[in-house]
Amino acid sequence: MAIHLGANQYGKAESRVVRIYRDTPRHQIRDLNVSSALRGRFEDAHTTGNQGEVLPTDTQKNTAFAFAKEKGVGAIEDFALTLGGHFLDAAAAADGARIEVEEYPWERITVDGADHDHSFVRAGSGIRTTVVNVEGRGSERKAYVVSGIRDLTVLKSTGSEFHGFLKDRYTTLPETDDRILATSLVARWRYDHTEVDWDKSYEQIKGLLLEQFARIHSLALQQTLYGMGEAVLEQHPEVAEIKFSAPNKHHFLVDLSPFGVENPGEVFIAADRPYGLIEATVVRDDASDPGSAWHAVPGFC
Amino acid sequence: MAIHLGANQYGKAESRVVRIYRDTPRHQIRDLNVSSALRGRFEDAHTTGNQGEVLPTDTQKNTAFAFAKEKGVGAIEDFALTLGGHFLDAAAAADGARIEVEEYPWERITVDGADHDHSFVRAGSGIRTTVVNVEGRGSERKAYVVSGIRDLTVLKSTGSEFHGFLKDRYTTLPETDDRILATSLVARWRYDHTEVDWDKSYEQIKGLLLEQFARIHSLALQQTLYGMGEAVLEQHPEVAEIKFSAPNKHHFLVDLSPFGVENPGEVFIAADRPYGLIEATVVRDDASDPGSAWHAVPGFC
Amino acid sequence: MAIHLGANQYGKAESRVVRIYRDTPRHQIRDLNVSSALRGRFEDAHTTGNQGEVLPTDTQKNTAFAFAKEKGVGAIEDFALTLGGHFLDAAAAADGARIEVEEYPWERITVDGADHDHSFVRAGSGIRTTVVNVEGRGSERKAYVVSGIRDLTVLKSTGSEFHGFLKDRYTTLPETDDRILATSLVARWRYDHTEVDWDKSYEQIKGLLLEQFARIHSLALQQTLYGMGEAVLEQHPEVAEIKFSAPNKHHFLVDLSPFGVENPGEVFIAADRPYGLIEATVVRDDASDPGSAWHAVPGFC
Amino acid sequence: MAIHLGANQYGKAESRVVRIYRDTPRHQIRDLNVSSALRGRFEDAHTTGNQGEVLPTDTQKNTAFAFAKEKGVGAIEDFALTLGGHFLDAAAAADGARIEVEEYPWERITVDGADHDHSFVRAGSGIRTTVVNVEGRGSERKAYVVSGIRDLTVLKSTGSEFHGFLKDRYTTLPETDDRILATSLVARWRYDHTEVDWDKSYEQIKGLLLEQFARIHSLALQQTLYGMGEAVLEQHPEVAEIKFSAPNKHHFLVDLSPFGVENPGEVFIAADRPYGLIEATVVRDDASDPGSAWHAVPGFC
């Protein structure tokens, strides 16, 4: 019986890179969580322990910090593309590099009605993400960008129904034409190419997702997600497909009748577990080949 | 050798009460985490197992949900005061009731430039808290209110020094006149009485804390906290004292010199552990007696 | 431009099913976290909101609890296979069902030197997992089983080297022939078929992983993982391949020289972030087709 | 109106000190989480920013690591006492020092039936804790030790009743003479003095807590906790009092009757929130004065 090394990947995860721009008194901050990983022909490292082809994870971390100064931190997609390309050049045995970056949002603190120059407060709704995969060498090099948002927690207090579903002997759920719909959204969209104004695209897509969540009269979380994705694809030709992973955060109407109290959709208990989990992809028919774009992206079918 | 029951307390923790006001098409949401506990003469429950004096924690939970409809949910301080008084009346053996409420902030989603009627997104900066202790019966009844905010994460990219400190043989920290100052603030303030416009007081104190954090040129986190507390006491006569618990979230300047790169305060690594932890109280000289106001409030000296 | 629904999946996540066997005074406990998801031809649910083909996530939850009594809970793999097959039968539009189960280990409490009949304490080293995918109907039905363990935290205080690695201008890591090696292991192995004594296989593989971690003189975490996987494949013909995801939990030697104190490998600081992250697959050459076995398994390349 | 500094405390929290003893091939590991804090006359640091009396939190961290080598790490209580005394000597303005230490348990990995010399696996049931407060100078010095255990998760599948409780109009809980009782125990006991064999005392008390949990037929979690505490005080004269904080982790019997299935105490759903929370103190009548022993110990009434 013969045994061999299969898919593999190694890198440094969760370097917390904070970049301050202080060229003028009005500072800017970009607050990142950077993970990098290389994959490829690393058989020796695994089978004999020879590390001659292995660029240490410590070096990957050093590079992320050094590049934050040398190359600067603009859009996280650009930062990830630069890092990924560099690592492929630096490690000859690597066939692919995967760079994941999260960015935490900060707002300026208001003092006397004006935004402060160098004092910030963490803002709340959603963390920006990107996963970049770079593969190949020279003219064969390809880069894939999947950007997204996570922890975007939204709720509708009405405008959500759920009925007409399949029933079997284990079905007890009552049908309803008015319930709370709430989720902590994770969305990731694959860009068709890399000629994108990343910051602008992100802000617009985030705004559109929120707007569509509000606008759509929901017959099921599936239908809401599809509508959100459809709008993104219609208005953003730079997006090839979009995937959602959305826990249905149940809010159960509390039965107050034992206390002689009516509860017409006013008092709910927010439950932790179990929760529904809805995953869906919306894709344009003529989308480009995804290649390795979704390589090791967790939490999606 | 004789043994006896000492301090004790029991209750239901973390009921997630969500109250929707839907009297008009423009819904309102109050999203709470409610914990209640009773303390007093519960020896029998502990020593013989006789539960005749014990109002079950399940009943406490039921009451929180029923009151969300029967009494309504306005300011969390009022909700807690009502619950606490009720439980003391309901359980004759209880000498004190402690009600803790957290409120999660939501903002309306913007659609076509207008706030949506019934669609919300979780907002980010800080979770509102209150701890209410009620004691005594009839004309002896006293109520103590400690309100606050947690998870208020703030950062200054300059305007923070740290030097002139005590040194011993284990001191290696270099002195600095320019560093990042960052913390995830927990603040709790004790009200002098209960005749307060709770919502207004909370919003103003939150704003003042942020403004003072920005405004104060920091010589140490201690001095920043003291200045923040002093401002609250000066501008809010309804506040008797304020306590802070503030992790000093270290941002270390990264040494890029091995790569021939200068780093004049631009690239930092945000560290997780260890962290500094600064706790301080600022109190007015003529503050009222705290009584049991700080009963079982964690995370403060 | 046309848009369509791509990959999708929906279900109920994290039902905490606890099954007590009490047929004799000596109780047994199986403590599970069960998630189920269906995938397939659910276009209508997404595009028109018609839920006629959708077996509600609530029904999936009910079924998990009912089956805990009706079918019993033996090995989690059997429980998952039964649930998965049932859901495919119950939902005609489903092409595949994915069942994930975690089991939390309990040990009996010792009283007077004997194991107690009905009192348990949570044990610590590792949580057992399985992911089962069932596809097809009638004679076409196929089932894939990937079992594993997570949170198996191990440490070697010596017997670990790391040197001879690739260096570039960002490399500062010193080479070492003696360091601490620590990880919180996630391992998942794919079974070649379903004719397996699941409980026995799990216990043996867990033991073997621990033993090999101890036994292997490590030249890198990659080499340790490969050796662990190789041993599993050699001794367990029922296993087709095994995947690891292993954070390299860095323990840095503390520089005590400023205090005139030597530190020959005795005092370390355990760091949180960043951490190395090593992922590797070890597979036998004649492994069966994985099919959908790894469908939506997070955290692996 | 005058304002002044009230209670205050500052220090370094959560230094992850790992100490390896490698004097022989059979290594030993002590894996600690160390937090220190000083309190006292630190007005200047807060009001003027003058740090002349402030021993930096960074120095406190350095000292913890240096002492791990210089003084060694035996029982965590001894390590904390040594650190606390040192800090009081080092910082003249400090009136008290508080040292908190947690220790994570490791077991040796078994290889060929024998314990391995330098390979370990994290063990599971309970994390050992201590909080030491040292106050005063010279002959006035006093030290207080509160040790404990947390995350000791235990469950009884029978032998637990709950009935005869107080009822009001919000009571719906049915009485029961057979339920699951489960908790994740936090216990902290105050030692009467410091002439204690700490390791032996800890192991015996941990064992006794488990044994009593199993042995006691429970009429309520309060009664179980009291019995556990009573046994500790009876058998451990070195313990003055013991406090418990115990979430009642509800396991609700699932109603399977809609499916025509009986459920005689066999299938439960483990709930997350809300949970009961029971806190109780058991104290001997002639206990020594607690002094500052419980200073800033969270989670206890």
Image (cartoon, coloured by chain):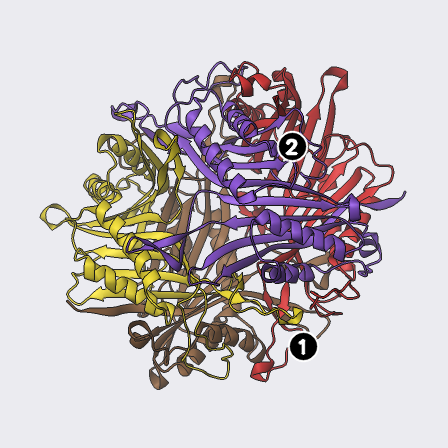
Chain colours: A purple, B yellow, C red, D brown
Q: Which residue is mark 2?
A: C74
Q: Quadrant of the N terminus of chain C?
A: top right
Compare residues D7 and B119 and report the one nearer the observer.
B119
Instruction: Residue B34: give x, y in percent of width and height.
Output: 33, 42
Q: Is residue B53 left or right of residue A52?
A: left
User: Which sits earlier in the primary sequence, circle 2 or circle 1?
Assistant: 2
Instruction: Residue B52: give x, y in percent of width and height.
Output: 27, 39
Q: Amino acid at mark 1?
A: Pro
Q: Is residue D3 left or right of residue C52?
A: left
Q: Pointers 2 and 1 in contact (CB under 8 A)?
A: no
**Other residues around mark 1 within 10 Å, as few (<14) / some (14–19) / many (≥20):** few
Q: Residue at x 36, y 57 (%)?
A: A116
Compare residues C177 and B262 and report the one nearer the observer.
B262
SS class of the residue under badge 1?
Answer: loop
Q: Amino acid at mark 2?
A: Gly
Front of the two marks 2 and 1: 1
What's the chain of the residue with tag 1? C
**Other residues around mark 2 within 10 Å, as few (<14) / some (14–19) / many (≥20):** few
